[in-house]
Image (cartoon, rainbow, N blue to C red):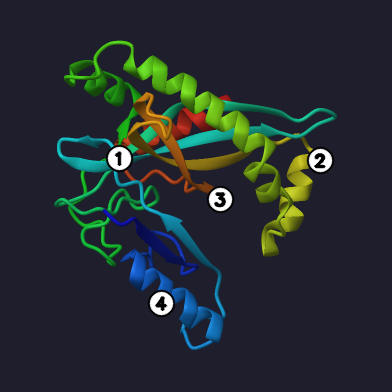
Amino acid sequence: QQPRWWFKVASGHGGHGSRLLGATKAAAEIELLASGGSSSANREVLLQRDVDDCMKLDDCRFTLRLYLVIIEGKVRSTYLAKQGLVYQALEGSNITNCSQAALRTQGSARASGAPPAKDLDWLRQKFDETPGLGPGSFSLLWRRLRRLALRCIAGPINATLEKPMGEVNAASIVGACLGLPKILGLDVILAERSPAGLEGPWPWLLEVNRFPALGMRAPSDASIKLRIVRDA
């Protein structure tokens, strides 16, 4: 099976502009961008390979929204919050999006009817009850997520923090001087196994969000996000 590719255009939040393309179509889009003939030519574009062996729960794809808390000082301290959210796709869609809970159909960012996000305790229980996973699977996942977060700190996180932040740059500098924490959102999808064939769940980083939504959109949001902000 040929790999599929996500073609993501910088077009606001909620997955607007994301398309799932076959290899031939993705190559054609790249050629069009290079020639300047694409309507996306003047915007940032990300081409990302789809995780085709991703895990599913209740026959739906899902992603995790994790929170990495960074406190600047003489020595930067960082930790991965133990709370996080689980977002499931709707109606068999291949698309999930952590900022709007789910995408109903390919190319649409409507989250109407999306179930509320679940927390990581729910995920642990689902793992315990799922044949082939069972007790211990979540602990294995958490160890792998912590290693993923450590790799992010050494790579993508530094690039994210150093990137100009436009109108909020001054506020970010003041916050760092006052020792206020910076909360980043990590979007992760799980594969059935690692690239080397180790049994899953194996986490793949999808995105690092500089400004993850911390508004309370549902009771589950409130219970998780309030704890993250309070603990930070």
Residue that extends furthest to the right in the rendered view of this protein: 74
Residue tagged 4: 28
Task: Say which amino acid is labelled 1.
Answer: Cys
Residue tagged 2: 177
Query: Which circle, 4 or 3, is nearer the viewer?
Result: 4
Residue tagged 1: 54
| First reached walking from the N terminus: tag 4 or tag 2 | 4
Query: Which circle, 4 or 2, is nearer the viewer?
Result: 4
Instruction: Identify whether 95 is placed above or below 181.
Output: below
Q: Please name whichever residue, 137 or 173, is drawn nearer the observer in this view of the structure.
A: 137
Query: Which circle, 1 or 3, is nearer the viewer?
Result: 1
Q: Residue at x 73, y 43 (%)?
A: 175
| First reached walking from the N terminus: tag 1 or tag 4 | 4
Residue tagged 3: 211
Task: Say which amino acid is labelled 3.
Answer: Phe
In this view of the protein, can residue 232 be seen by the observer? no
Q: In the figure, is residue 186 to the left or right of 59?
A: right
Residue that extends furthest to the bottom in the rendered view of this protein: 37
Label 3 to label 2, Cα distance in Å? 19 Å
Query: Which circle, 1 or 2, is nearer the viewer?
Result: 1
